[in-house]
Image (tube, grey):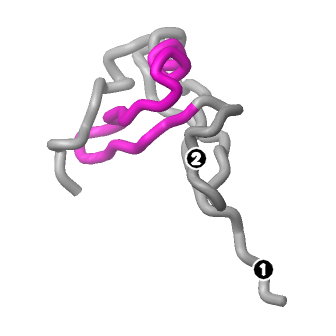
Amino acid sequence: MSTAYAGPDTRAMTCAQTQALIKGDHAAVLTTGPNTYDRFVRQFGNECDWPEVSVSTTVPTKHGECRAYRRKEPIKFPD
């Protein structure tokens, strides 16, 4: 994983700032730890490519955990 793709660090922002950044850009790649980052999206929207869906998660922020959404492929059940 390369830090070249990392974006703003959620640990340096408030929850409101983190959520506003994601909502304003519809999606954002955010740093969440020393060596971690992910792409976060609005809860409802077309930022996910089919068959991906947005799933709830939390990210660390200045004042604690904050709810955010990221893309994930749905679970495939055997036929």
Horizontal placement of 54 versus 14: left or right? right
The N terminus lies in which quarter of the figure? bottom left
Amino acid type assigned to the residue bearing label 1 in the image: Phe
The image quarter containing residue 45 is top right
**Closer to us: mark 2 or mark 1?**
2
- Tell me the distance, in whole angstroms, between the alpha carbons under discs 2 and 1: 21 Å
Q: Quick one: label 1, few (<14), some, or many (20+) residues within 10 Å?
A: few
Taking 35 as reference, is 8 above or below it?
A: above
Marked residue nearer the N-terminal end (2 or 1) = 2
In the picture of the structure, the residue carrying the numbered disc 1 is 77
Residue 60: x and y, percent? 45, 29
- The quarter in which the C terminus is drawn is bottom right
Magenta part of the chain: 18-41
x, y percent for residue 56: 66, 40
The residue carrying mark 2 is: 48
In the image, is 43 to the left or to the right of 72? right
Q: Residue at x 49, y 33 (%)?
A: 59
Q: Where residue 66 sits in the image (x, y, percent)? A: 56, 25
- Per the image, label 1 sits on a secondary structure element best described as loop
Q: Amino acid at mark 2?
A: Cys
* Residue 34: mark in rendering: none
Pick whichever, 64 or 10, lies toward us: 10
Q: Which residue ends up furthest to the right in the rendered image? A: 79
**Residue 42 lies within the magenta run:** no
